[in-house]
Image (cartoon, rainbow, N blue to C red):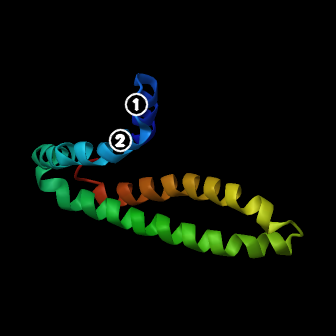
Amino acid sequence: MTIPRLVEGAAVGNRLRRVARDHPRRDRLLPHPALAVAALLRLGAHCFRIALAVGLALIGVVLWGSVSGSMLPFLLRRCGLDPATSCAPFVATLVDVTGLLIYFNVVLVVLRGTVL
């Protein structure tokens, strides 16, 4: 959200510093509490299960990212590849793809029979 505001400010002739400085204050005041109240009214009794599913999925993705990011350089070195050049893009792609799989599986297990 910040980059489009900076580009818009540059196109209109505003100073980039002022746009970057004012942006977080304006956008944080109303949307987040309003969205939280709307979600609470819409989901009602299922809020705890949804929060549990998102929390568990977050823990799983972070743990998987940490383990794979720390172990992958050792595996690449053992295979004879340079871990410095191939590690960052490979870990990012691996964690993104498996993170989605982890999230969907956790949500499927936790929310089965209630929301799903």
Residue drawn where x is 63% and y is 69% of the image: 69
Image coordinates for residue 45, horizontal then vertical, percent: 12, 55
Residue drawn where x is 26% and y is 43% of the image: 27
From the viewer's perspective, is residue 18 above or below residue 94?
above
Instruction: Say if mark 1 contacts mark 2, CB within 8 Å.
Output: yes
Instruction: Provide the residue designation for mark 2.
Output: 18
Q: Quadrant of the N terminus?
A: top left
Q: How many marks?
A: 2
- Residue type highlighted by circle 1: Gly
Q: Name the mark on residue 68.
A: none
Q: Earlier in the sequence, mark 1 or mark 2?
A: 1
Instruction: Provide the residue designation for mark 1.
Output: 9
The one nearer the camera, 51 or 19, is 19
Query: Element under label 1?
Result: helix
Image coordinates for residue 78, horizontal then vertical, percent: 84, 75
Q: Residues within 10 Å of mark 1 (few under 14, many from 20)?
A: some
The one nearer the camera, 41 or 29, is 29
- Residue type highlighted by circle 2: Arg
Image coordinates for residue 51, horizontal then vertical, percent: 26, 60
Residue drawn where x is 31% and y is 43% of the image: 23
